[in-house]
């Protein structure tokens, strides 16, 4: 008797998943897109800071005032302003990871729990 109930529960679960996925867009595509966007922003910002660091070194060696020159101060201010944006990247990565976990729980696990309750398990 238990084998029949398990088989029927499995069949119900498969049909429920198939029905729930018909005609729906995937939510994971948007999350993957956001993750890739953050990854690209991280790479571009890293390259930008590498460029600014090289520029500061050149200004130090070529300017007559060295670190007191206006150009060096301007590059330093630009670098400090960019660091404010970089400080938010770990928070955004954590938010995307939390979003992925939330989507998996809401779209995959909860429907099976509801189906089990409807079947009387």
Image (spheres, rainbow, N blue to C red):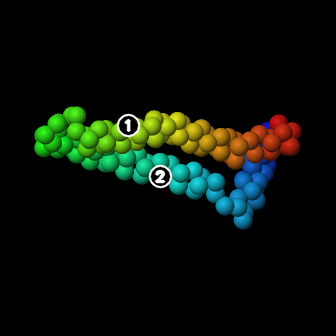
Q: How many marks?
A: 2
Badge 2: residue crowd in 10 Å (few <14, some 14–19, many ≥20): few
Give me the residue at 57% from left, 50% from top: 31
Task: Name the side, left or right, on which 38 lies relative to 21.
Answer: left
Residue furthest to the bottom = 23
Left/right of residue 87 with respect to residue 59 in the rendered view: right
Q: Which residue is mark 1?
A: 80
Compared across the picture, whether 93 is left or right of 105 comes to: left
**Mark number displayed over residue 36:** 2
Image coordinates of residue 46 in percent, x first then y, are 34, 44
Q: Percent position (x, y) of residue 115?
A: 80, 45
Which of the numbered marks, if any, corresponds to residue 113?
A: none
Quarter holding the C terminus is top right
Is the residue under label 2 in contact with that under label 1 (CB below 8 Å)?
no
* Residue 5 visible in this rendered orientation of the protein: no
Rounded to the nearest angstrom, the CA distance separating label 1 from label 2 is 25 Å
**Mark 1 nearby-residue class (10 Å; few <14, some 14–19, many ≥20):** few
Residue at image coords 66%, 61%: 25
Q: Position of residue 94 (x, y in %)?
A: 54, 36
Q: Secondary structure at mark 2?
A: helix
Is residue 103 something one can see in this rendering?
A: yes
Looking at the image, is 78 positioned above or below residue 17?
above
Q: Is 20 placed above or below 108 here? A: below
Quadrant in the rendering for residue 55: top left
Residue at horizontal 40%, vertical 46%? 42
As helix, strand or loop, the secondary structure at mark 1 comes to: helix
């Amino acid at each position: 008797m238990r084998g029949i109930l398990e088989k029927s529960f499995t069949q119900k679960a498969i049909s429920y998943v198939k029905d729930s996925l018909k005609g729906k867009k995937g939510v994971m595509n948007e999350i993957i897109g956001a993750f890739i966007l953050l990854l690209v922003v991280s790479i571009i910002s890293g390259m930008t800071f590498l460029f600014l660091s090289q520029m500061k070194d050149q200004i130090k060696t070529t300017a007559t005032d060295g670190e007191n020159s206006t150009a060096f101060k301007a590059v330093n201010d630009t670098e400090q302003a960019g660091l404010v944006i970089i400080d938010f990247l770990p928070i955004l990565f954590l938010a995307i990871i939390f979003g992925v976990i939330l989507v998996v729980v809401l779209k995959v696990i909860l429907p099976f729990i509801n189906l089990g309750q409807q079947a009387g398990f």
